Amino acid sequence: MEDYNKSKGIERTSIHAFRHWYEKKAVMNGINIVQLQHLLGHSNLEILKHYVEMLTEDLNYENIAQNPLESIKLENSKGKNIKLRK
């Protein structure tokens, strides 16, 4: 992994950095936190809570695959659907 990263110009490399990257991407893509806990082998959710709190500043609901706003259908007074995003 170290050789591959260096070939791509990535200086900081480690298994821990990869796990952190994976966890961040999984959370941002809407993974179930309990599933992530089991995938990473954490004994409890408190460990994940620390990482998720660190990621909240990176979360952008428009880019999350399972955005709950996408399932809402609003209608205007004429019965036409209203888009929540532009």
Image: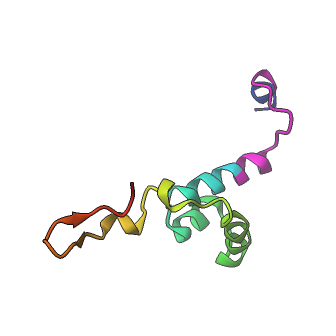
Using the rendered view, name the quadrant where residue 53 is placed. Answer: bottom right
The image shows residue 86, relative to residue 8, as above or below, that is below
In the image, farthest residue toward the left? 79
Q: Residue at x 30, y 70 (%)?
A: 72
In the image, farthest residue toward the top? 7
Q: Residue at x 50, y 53 (%)?
A: 63
In the image, residue 34 lies at what x, y percent?
54, 71
The image shows residue 85, relative to residue 21, as above or below, that is below
- Depth order, front residue of 71/3: 71
**The N terminus is located in which quarter?**
top right
Q: Is residue 53 left or right of residue 28?
A: right
Q: Is residue 11 left or right of residue 79?
A: right
In the image, residue 30 lies at what x, y percent?
49, 61
Q: Residue at x 72, y 46 (%)?
A: 18
- Depth order, front residue of 3/26: 26
| Colour treatment of the image | rainbow
Q: How many marks?
A: 0
Residue 10 is one of the magenta-drawn residues: yes
**The C terminus is located in which quarter?**
bottom left
Range of the magenta residues?
6-20
In the image, residue 2 lies at what x, y percent?
81, 31
In the image, farthest residue toward the right? 11
In the image, residue 38 lies at what x, y percent?
58, 65
Q: Residue at x 73, y 66 (%)?
A: 54
Residue 11 is one of the magenta-drawn residues: yes
